[in-house]
């Protein structure tokens, strides 16, 4: 069995990597929020995107856990999406105390519009960023995301 290195022995590049990702996330999120349609918030978009990306239905508790937010925060986001007609909230037929959340066609269209606006906003970066490096980096980032998702604490 190999001994896990102490935190003080960890390579500094790991912190630097996540620091860069955090800065990129902040810059990209701010840019994205500016172009979201119809007063859609980033948290609302994220829920819609999750449904399109993964498919299926979920409970509010499953969504709260997936996004690592409180059930109250998720309930607030879901109520706003429901009021916009972007999701349905139905009583779970197998457990009447639970609810099942599904995206609607209107929710899909709003999510797709947001992505189209983001792509338009990011269009000028195509000239500044080598697309082959984007593809290469994307596979590495997906690997890191999967590792972090597996190692949630």
Image (cartoon, grey):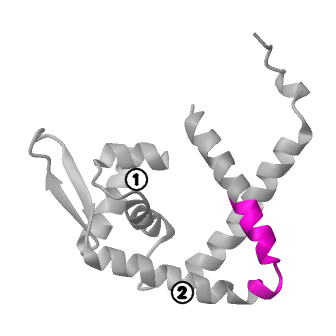
Which corner quadrant of the image does residue 96 belong to?
top left
| Residue 143 in the image, given as x and y percentages of width and height | 66, 48
Residues at marks 1 and 2, CA–CA distance in whole angstroms: 26 Å
- 118 horizontally vs 20: left or right: left
- 122 horizontally vs 99: left or right: right
Number of other residues with Cα within 10 Å of mark 2, as a class: few under 14, some 14 to 19, many 20 or more: some
Of 2 and 124, the residue lying toward us: 2
Query: Can you say which quadrant of the picture contains the C terminus?
Result: top right
Q: Is residue 131 above or below residue 145?
A: below
SS at badge 1: helix
Tell me if residue 134 is in the magenta stretch. yes
Residue at point 80% right, 14% down?
A: 3
Q: Is residue 150 above or below residue 17?
A: above
Which residue matches tag 1?
73
Residue at point 80% right, 69% down?
A: 133
**Magenta segment boundaries in residue numbering:** 125-138
- 106 horizontally vs 131: left or right: left
Give the mark nearer the N terminus: 1 vs 2.
1
**Predominant SS of the magenta segment:** helix
Residue at point 28% right, 63% down?
A: 79
Which corner quadrant of the image does residue 44 belong to?
bottom left
Residue at point 40% right, 57% down?
A: 54
Number of other residues with Cα within 10 Å of mark 1, as a class: few under 14, some 14 to 19, many 20 or more: few
């Amino acid at each position: 069995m190999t001994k896990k290195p102490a935190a003080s022995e960890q390579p500094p590049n790991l912190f630097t990597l996540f620091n860069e990702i955090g800065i990129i996330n902040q810059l990209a999120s701010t840019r994205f929020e500016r172009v979201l349609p119809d007063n859609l918030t980033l948290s609302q978009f994220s829920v819609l995107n999750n449904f399109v990306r993964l498919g299926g239905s979920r409970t509010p508790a499953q969504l709260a856990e997936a996004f690592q937010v409180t059930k109250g925060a998720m309930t607030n986001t879901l109520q706003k999406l429901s009021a916009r007609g972007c999701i349905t909230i139905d009583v779970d037929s197998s457990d009447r105390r639970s609810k099942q959340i599904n995206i609607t066609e209107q929710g899909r269209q709003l999510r797709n519009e947001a992505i189209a606006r983001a792509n338009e906003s990011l269009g000028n970066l195509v000239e500044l960023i080598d697309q082959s490096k984007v593809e290469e980096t994307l596979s590495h980032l997906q690997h890191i995301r999967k590792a972090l998702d597996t190692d949630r604490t």
